[in-house]
Amino acid sequence: MIVSPLPRVARAADVPAVRAVTDAAYHPYIERIGIRPAPMDADHAAEVAAGHVFVLGEPVAGLVVLVPAADHLFLDSLAVHPDAHGTGLGRALLGFAEARARELGLPEIRLYTNALMWENRKLYPRYGYELVERRVDGPYDRFHYRKHLD
């Protein structure tokens, strides 16, 4: 696997890899939370076509889905293939999200994670994200976070 220093915008040809990495990253949570995590059922082709997906690695080993809003950047999904865990891809993708928000002139990043994805609930505060609220959205019990950018 070759990893460039910065993610690139995903292209239509990347959709199968985006789907495969997302499925591999989120599949272990199905049994724990009792439902498929929402990113597994996302319309990856539409997200790629909208320019919201950024990928890392050749072949793709990690990705982040970033959706700009009027006053923040929504980090919709961050996925790293299990074979690439511990390589720094997740950290690089979080750093890229911050750089992208700044590039777009947005003052904060928002995201949420499932209440039962306790690894994420430990991770995000280490990178400066503060817990805003816990909310049930349909079948999903989610912790919502934000990070103000300086």
Image: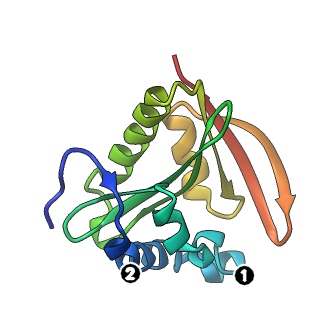
| SS at badge 2 | helix
Mark positioned earlier in the residue sequence (1 or 2): 2
Label ID, residue 113? none
Q: Amino acid at mark 2?
A: Pro
Residue 125 in the figure: left or right of residue 10: right
Instruction: Name the residue that disc number 1 marks.
Output: 34
Instruction: Name the residue that disc number 2 marks.
Output: 16
Q: Residues within 10 Å of mark 1 (few under 14, many from 20)?
A: few
Tell me the quarter of the picture where residue 84 sits. Answer: bottom left
Relative to 131, say whether 24 is above or below: below
In this view, the residue in front, 133 or 107, is: 107
Q: Residue at left 67%, top 30%?
A: 71
How far is disc 1 from disc 2 in space, using C-alphas?
25 Å
In this view, the residue in front, 101 or 25, is: 101
Q: Residue at left 79%, top 62%?
A: 141
Count of number-bearing discs: 2
Tell me the quarter of the picture where residue 53 sits. Answer: bottom left
In this view, the residue in front, 149 or 43, is: 43
User: Mark 1 or mark 2: which is in front?
Assistant: 2
| SS at badge 1 | loop
Q: Residues within 10 Å of mark 2 (few under 14, many from 20)?
A: few
Determine the residue located farthest toward the top in the rendered image: 150
Q: Residue at left 38%, top 81%?
A: 16
Residue 65 in the figure: left or right of residue 85: right
Please state the horizontal and vertical placement of residue 127, each as a whole percent of the image. 49, 35
Q: Residue at left 60%, top 73%?
A: 42
Q: Amino acid at mark 1?
A: Gly
Query: Disc 1, disc 2: CB below 8 Å?
Result: no
Please state the horizontal and vertical placement of residue 27, each as a whole percent of the image. 52, 80
Colour setting:
rainbow
Tell me the quarter of the picture where residue 94 sits. Answer: top left
